Amino acid sequence: MKAFPYNPQFNQEHNGMDLRDYFAAKAMQAFLSRSDTSLVINKRETSLIAYLMADAMMEARNGK
């Protein structure tokens, strides 16, 4: 599922952003905005946490 579906009227080259990626970006943004930055160990771990949150949001969205 796309967060921003393809719209040929505005952009013929972009196929849209996956909803999972959109959720992960939002989760990472919230995670990194915390004042306690000691929780951020490395970039890989931070991105994995963001995608775990995105997967949970996708499951909740689908009623699982």
Image (spheres, rainbow, N blue to C red):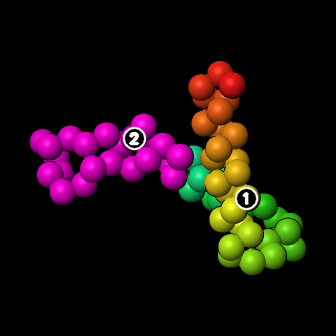
Q: Disc 2 residue type?
A: Lys
**Residue extent of the magenta highlight:** 1-22
Q: In which quarter of the image is residue 58?
A: top right
Q: Is mark 1 in CB contact (under 8 Å) with mark 2?
A: no
Crowdedness of circle 2 by 10 Å Cα count: few (<14), some, many (20+)? few
Q: Mark 2 points at which residue?
A: 2
Of labels 1 and 2, earlier in sequence is 2
Outermost residue, front side: 64
Residue at point 39%, 50% (across, down): 17
Pick whichever, 30 or 54, lies toward us.
Answer: 54
What amino acid is found at the position of numbered circle 1 in the picture?
Ile
At a point 78% along the width and 61% down the height, the residue shown is 34
Q: Circle 1 sits on which residue? A: 49
| Residue at image point 31% right, 40% down | 5
Of the 4 image quadrants, the one containing the C terminus is: top right
Taking the image as drawn, is residue 9 in sight? yes
Residue found at x 70% / y 51%: 52
SS at badge 2: loop
Q: Classify mark 1: residues with Cα within 10 Å, few (<14), some (14-19) or many (20+).
A: some
